[in-house]
Amino acid sequence: MTDLKEVAHLAGVSRATAARAFASPDVVRLETRERVFAAARALGFRPNRLGRQLRLQTTNLIGVVVPNLLNPVFAEQFQAMERAARARGYNLLLATTDYTAERESAVVEELLRQRVDGLVLTVTDAEHNRVLQSLINEDTPFVLAYHQTGNPDYSAVSVDNRAGMALATRYLIDAGHQRVAMVAGPAMQSDRARLRYEGYRDAMAACGLEARPVIEMPAHTSADFAALEPLLRGPDAPSALVCSNDLLAISLIAELRRNGWGVPERLSVIGFDGIALGTQMHPTLCSVVQPIAELAHIVIDQLLARIAGAVPVSHCLPCHIRPGESTQPYQEMLHAQPQ
C-alpha cells in the first residue's frame, strides 16, 4: 500500500513537506504543492482514504465547492441543496474558491480527505480544468452545477446561458433599445459569463445591430462607475445594459444612481440569475431567472445516482425573464429626458 514516503519521493520533496502540502496547503509553495498532489494522484494516495475500496464505506457527506457566498445565487443554491440532501440522509460540507483555479485544487483535495461520498462543483472553467480530469481518473462521483459541457464524462446541471442572455438582449431590443452593451467581471472570469456574452452577440446580430466589446468591471459582482463613465457620453452611448449576473447589476444600478444616472430614466439595466434580492430593491431588478431550487434538487438527485454507479448525464433547464422596474421602453426613456 502506498504511503506518504513514496509520494514525497516521487514529488522530489521531503516527507515533512509532503505532509504539510496535505495538512496546510496554503503554507506550501504552489509549484511544490502541485507536484505533491500530482504524485499522490499518480500513486492513488490520499490521507485518511485508503483507495477506492475504503470510499465504498460511505460517510453520507457531500462536498460542495462554489466560487463564493457573496453572490446570493450560490447561497440560495446551497440552502436548497442542503434541504434536498438532508431529506435523503446526507449532510453537506462547503468550500469556496473565489474564482481561483489553484484554490479549486486545494479545496477539492481537502474535501476528499474528509472522505465525502461525492462532490458538487462550480468551477472557473469546466472545459479546461485539471481537477475534473483527476476526479474522472480516480472514479470520484461529481456533478457540475451551472456549467454546460460537451464532455460525456461529466455530469452537469445548468441553464442555457447563451440562450438566456440572448433572451435578455432581445427583451431590450424589443423595447426599442438598439444601443445595448454587456457588463461583466474581469476578463469574463467564468465560462458562464463567456457563454452569456455569446448570447448577447447572437441577439444583436440577429437584429442587425452591432455587438460591442464587453465592459469589464474590476470585480465579478461589484461595479465601478469610473470604468463605465467614459462610455456613457456621446451619441453612441448605450441606452441599455445587460449584466453577467444579478449582483453585478444591483451594484451597477447603485453606482449609476449615486452618480446622477437614473435607472431606468437614463439607462435600462437587466441582470442574470433571478435572485430574490432583486425583487426587494428599488427599482426592482429585471432579470433572467435561473430555477435555482429546481437546479439544486436535480444536482443532489443526480449526484446520488452517480454515487450509486449511474452513468454521467446532463440537464439544461429553461430560464425566463422576470420583468422589473430597472428597464423601460426606449421611447419612454426619451420622454423622461430633460428637454
Image (spheres, grey):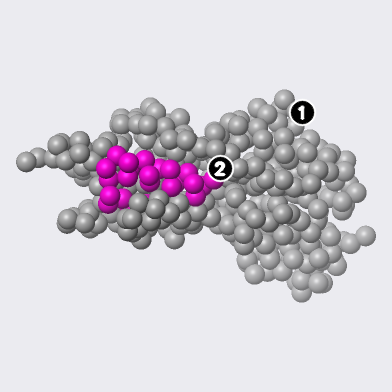
Between 241 and 256, the residue placed more toward the observer is 241
Taking the image as shown, residue 82 lies to the left or right of residue 260, namely: right
Residue that badge 1 annotates: 89
Tell me if residue 262 can be seen.
Answer: no
Report helix, strand or loop for mark 2: strand
Give how far across and how far down residue 321 sits, in percent: 43, 35
The numbered mark at residue 159 is 2
Residue at position x 66%, y 51% from top? Answer: 107
Residue at 30%, 37% in the rendered image: 327
Q: Amino acid at mark 1?
A: Gly
**First-in-chain label (1 vs 2):** 1
Q: Is residue 170 magenta?
A: yes
Label 2 sits on what residue type? Answer: Val
Asked whether residue 130 is in view, the answer is yes
Neighbor class of circle 1 (other Cα within 10 Å; few <14, some 14-19, many 20+) is few
Can you tell which of label 1 and label 2 is closer to the viewer? 2
Cα distance in 3D space between marks 1 and 2: 27 Å
Q: Is residue 190 left or right of residue 135?
A: left
- Residue occupying the far right of the picture: 1
What is the x, y in percent for residue 136? 76, 56
126 or 118: nearer the eye?
126
Tags 1 and 2 in contact by the CB under 8 Å rule?
A: no
Q: Which residues are magenta?
A: 159-185
Name the residue: 51% across, 37% down.
319
User: Which quadrant is home to the N terminus?
Assistant: bottom right
Task: Give the vertical position of 244 relative to 9 (above or below).
Answer: above
Q: Residues within 10 Å of mark 2 (few under 14, many from 20)?
A: many
Query: Callout 1: helix, strand or loop?
Result: loop
